[in-house]
Image (spheres, rainbow, N blue to C red):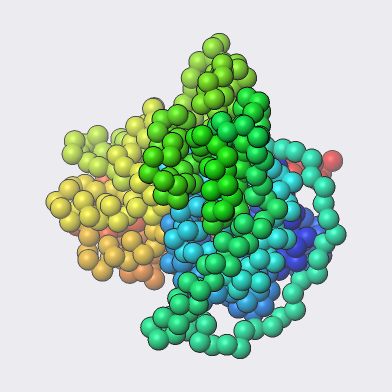
Amino acid sequence: MGDEAVALGAVHAGLSGVYAYPGTPSTEITEFIQNSPAARERGIRSRWCTNEKTAMEAALGMSYAGKRALVCMKHVGMNVCADAFVNAGITGVNGGLVVLAADDPSMHSSQNEQDSRFYGKFAMVPILEPSTQQEAYDMMAEAFDLSESLKLPVLLRIVTRLAHSRAAVEVGTPRGQNPLQADKERTHWVLLPGNARRQYASLIEKQPRLLQAAEASSHNSLQLSGQKGLGVIACGIACNYVREAAPQGISLLKVSQYPLPVSLVRQLADNSSEILVVEDGQPFAEEQVKALLSAGYPVSGRLTGRLPRTGELNPDNVAAAFGQPAASAFAPAKNLAGRPPQLCQGCGHRDVYTALNQVLAEYPDARVFGDIGCYTLGALPPFQAIDSCVDMGASITMAKGAADAGQFPAVAIIGDSTFTHSGMTGLLDAVNDHANITVVISDNLTTGMTGGQDSAGTHKYEAICLALGVEREHLHVVVPLPKNMPEITRIIRDEINYPGVSVIIPQRECIQTFNRKLRAKKAEQK
């Protein structure tokens, strides 16, 4: 898979640590390194982090010490680590630092379709965007080298289809890890305003070097057809769709390294009558191409509607942009009924929602604020138990805000991994303000939605809640099973009627990880 190519490329590039929070479609990168014998032999650090911000900061610390670090996340994780990511462009780096953002066009497992390339441009750091699994592998070594030569973090952006599709990859000779060599130049790292102003000026001065690197990159290539007709700019994985679907006689600029190679764009424009920009995600390159060329030069793409404004690209819709008949390879099957996802049979979240719905039926104006995780499926039939789901950790703070407005009852439901990711601070706000909310931390002892990775706070949630100021008598741990329904519903009812912050922790292992352990135990016994 593309994710595995990224991971192996990083290991072979002299990686010393990978820092990540699981999120589709990036999860398999860290899992590959965790399961890699070569990574274990090299002592590469690979435990999951509490969230993307802590991952980014830990990787920056490893870079400070002179070693090479990789940070992995899905696109919305860039929002969580943005403070550290943007400031890393100001501090610069010591050891190579690569930030891997896996974008999810079509929102297969996400809340939005944001394009991480905008973060790279905003932070003024180099961006790499592989078009194939081979490039994903090769680019890791190049990204670390580029990071160390420019003394900047490098953003490497992939998309779902590259992350989860497969191809053969030729591997190179592994490189050794950097020696421990902490940076001695303190002014780079202490962002007091005086230092930060100098560092920011240095970052601005580096921009021509970033552009030169993109112009000279072997991953950016221009093929002119000799006919002054249609010119195409294809970014990352979209280059494959263009090569599959485009008619003969087009000129093609493949872009896999940014800043956008200005001279190549202008050369393409001089040899074409119009330009079509093909890119997965938002019109990141298209907007820049329009700004580069004269006002009357025809540029089309996702902004103009020649390509779909939302969703993944594929050979069909790219072919349609060329005026070609669409093939049937990507047509949806006609003999399958749509089936929305559901919570697994035997999942403890089912019993939580059953109890919650039973009690809240007594409160016609009740509102349940949900969060990000497999338990979000409680919004769908048969439970239909969630009224909101916005972003990681929003359940507690939204419940607090609604309660501040007079909403009663206001219930928050959040998973164990999401609670430690970004729910703890919201609970502290609620405690400090004596908010009238009931918080349910549905603990299945794992990060379930992404496949069962370790959850940072397992067996610590009671202690965390007490430390944040939740009163002992209003903190309950229950086992979500049908036989315990009378006890659970009584506790929920009592705590809803308590005029303050109460926390209920239904705790039962994820049925999938339980079955996995059971199968492994049986295999050992054989």
Image location (x, y in percent) of residue 127: 57, 57
Q: Quadrant of the N terminus?
A: top right
Q: Where residue 274 sits in the image (x, y, percent)?
A: 49, 35
Q: Could you tell me which residue is drawn at 22 percent across and 66 percent down?
A: 433
- Residue for point 59% across, 50% down: 264
User: Which image quadrant is residue 259 in?
Assistant: bottom right
**Quarter containing the C terminus:** top right
Name the residue located 33 percent from the left edge and 61 percent from the top edge.
Answer: 426
In depth, the one of 40 and 520 nearer the eye is 40
61 or 447: nearer the eye? 61
Q: Residue furthest top?
A: 335
How many numbered tags mark residues here? 0
Q: Residue furthest left?
A: 406
Residue 79 shown left or right of residue 171 in the figure: left
- 245 or 32, which is in the foreground? 245
Q: Position of residue 355 (x, y in %)?
A: 36, 38
Residue 406 to residue 195: above or below: above
Residue 241 visible to an observer of this rendering: no
